[in-house]
Image (cartoon, rainbow, N blue to C red):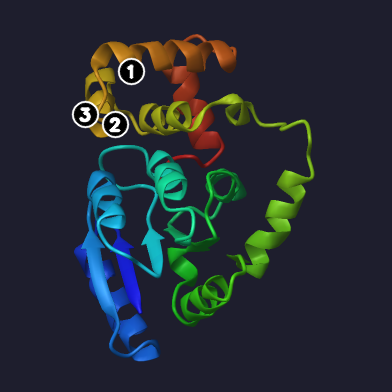
Amino acid sequence: MRILLADDHAILRSGLKLLLAQAYPETEFGEAETCQQALERALSHPWDIVILDISMPGRGGLDVLKEIRAQLPMIPVLILSMFEEPQFAVRAFRAGASGYLTKASAGAELIRAIGRILAGGRYVSSVLAEQLAAVLGDAEGHQLHERLSNREFELLRLIGAGKTVKESAGELCLSVNTVSTYRTRILEKMNMRTNADLTRYAINNKLVE
């Protein structure tokens, strides 16, 4: 078994390795702490599964997920995220994830998720599954942020967290001009005028920590 663990928290990676080593003895682990590292290491080794946090520093985690799936379509990716809101899982599955699990529910459920995914299935917790069904069943996409691309969605979250354009550019590994263009598009798509409007929306819709 070869598992790549991509998360920016070393303590969490260590805990996951201990947990997974008990279920899958003699497992070979790889680690990444940024999105760029995750992409590079995913492409450089034949992994059986990639466990990916979509909120790591650097490039947007959803963009990295899409690129991994585009270049390595046979390698399943399980998203392990702190976000329980269904809109994050919807975007992850649309980007090619094989499963979505919150960090709060990791443990025995993580082992079940990996087992199902390696058997060719998909995995989502029963609680989140009900919420997902409701969201996916709404063909109109009733929330404003559903209009955004994955990169615009990442920027919305950074603005909601109080990041400046320069800070957001650093987080996303983009130029300030590019981020400013994305910000303008977000405001237009969401019919808003200021960063304060975006911040209120992100907080009210639980898009930020």
At x 48%, y 59%, the residue is 74
Q: Check whether the beta carbons of the residues at disc 2 and disc 1 lie within 8 A of each other.
A: yes
Q: Position of residue 70 (x, y in %)?
A: 46, 44
Q: Check whether the beta carbons of the residues at disc 3 and disc 2 lie within 8 A of each other.
A: yes
Q: Quadrant of the C terminus?
A: top left
Mark pair 2, 1: CA separation? 9 Å
At x 37%, y 43%, the residue is 64
- Residue type at mark 3 is Gly
Q: How many marks?
A: 3
| Residue denoted by label 2 | 172
| Residue denoted by label 3 | 170
Q: Secondary structure at mark 3?
A: helix
Mark pair 1, 3: CA separation? 10 Å
Q: Earlier in the sequence, mark 2 or mark 1?
A: 2
In the figure, 180 relative to 137: above or below?
above
Q: Is residue 150 toward the left or the right of residue 32 in the image?
A: right
Q: Quadrant of the N terminus?
A: bottom left
Q: Earlier in the sequence, mark 1 or mark 3?
A: 3
Q: Secondary structure at mark 2?
A: helix
Q: Secondary structure at mark 1?
A: helix
Q: Is residue 155 toward the left or the right of residue 188 in the image?
A: left
In the figure, 149 relative to 14: above or below?
above
Q: Is residue 91 toward the left or the right of residue 66 in the image?
A: right
- Residue type at mark 1 is Val
Mark pair 3, 2: CA separation? 6 Å
At x 51%, y 64%, the residue is 101
Q: Residues within 10 Å of mark 3 (few under 14, many from 20)?
A: some
Which of the numbered marks, if any, corresponds to residue 156? none
| Residue denoted by label 1 | 179
**Is 157 or 133 nearer to us in this picture?**
133
Q: Check whether the beta carbons of the residues at disc 1 and disc 3 lie within 8 A of each other.
A: no
